[in-house]
Image (cartoon, rainbow, N blue to C red):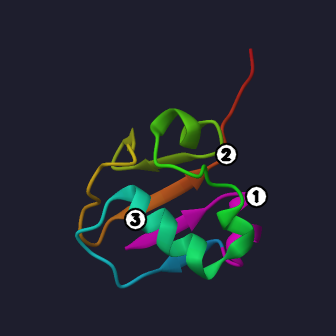
């Protein structure tokens, strides 16, 4: 599983790209695994798994769509962590 982190998440994770030997996991499980290793990143996550709460903090993108916290991630896939964007 590859994670590509965009600012500010790259600084919180200590790298722009991270490769993890994980498979058959949900997006929420991936984020929790990252949070266990990176306490600064953990502070950016909501306490409970929920799409609305998560998307107010970060947008998990991959395979052409925004992942849900319950989505099982594809083996060998890539998840991009973007900050939420607002504008007009």
Pointers 3 and 1 in contact (C-beta within 8 Å): no
Location of mark 3 (residue)? 29
Disc number placed over residue 74 in the picture, else none? none
Q: Position of residue 65 (x, y in %)?
A: 38, 39
Query: Residue at the location (70% across, 74% down)?
Result: 39
First of labels 3, 1 by sequence position: 1
Marks 2/3: CA–CA distance = 19 Å
Question: Mark 2 packing: few (<14 Cα in 10 Å), some, or many (20+)?
Answer: some
- 79 sits to left or right of 5: left
The residue sitting at 62% across, 54% down in the picture is 45
In the displayed structure, 34 sits above or below 60; it is below
Expressed as whole percent of the image width and height from the top left, the position of residue 76 reads 28, 72
Badge 1 marks a residue whose secondary structure is loop
Outermost residue toward the bottom in this view: 21
Is residue 12 on the magenta stretch? yes
Q: Earlier in the sequence, mark 2 or mark 3?
A: 3
Q: Give the residue number, with chain letter if any, for mark 2.
A: 83
Q: Find out whether the residues at labels 2 and 1 contact each other: C-beta distance under 8 Å.
A: yes
At 54% from the left and 73% from the top, the residue drawn is 34
Residue extent of the magenta highlight? 1-15
56 is higher (above) or lower (below) than 58: above
The tag on residue 8 is: 1
Viewer-nearest residue: 72 or 86? 72
The quarter of the displayed image where residue 9 is located: bottom right
Q: Is residue 46 above or below residue 13?
A: above
- Mark 2 touching mark 3, by CB under 8 A? no
Residue at point 53% right, 78% down? 18
How much space separates mark 2 and mark 1, taking CA atoms?
Answer: 7 Å
Of residue 13 and residue 49, the one placed in the foreground of this image is 49
Q: Residue furthest front?
A: 47
């Amino acid at each position: 599983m590859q994670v590509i982190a965009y600012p500010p998440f790259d600084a919180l994770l200590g790298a722009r790209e991270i490769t993890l030997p994980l498979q058959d996991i949900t997006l929420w499980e991936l984020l929790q695994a990252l949070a266990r290793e990176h306490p600064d990143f953990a502070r950016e996550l909501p306490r409970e798994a929920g799409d609305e709460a998560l998307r107010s903090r970060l947008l998990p993108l991959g395979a052409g769509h925004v992942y849900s916290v319950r989505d099982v991630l594809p083996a060998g896939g890539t998840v991009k962590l973007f900050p939420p964007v607002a504008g007009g």
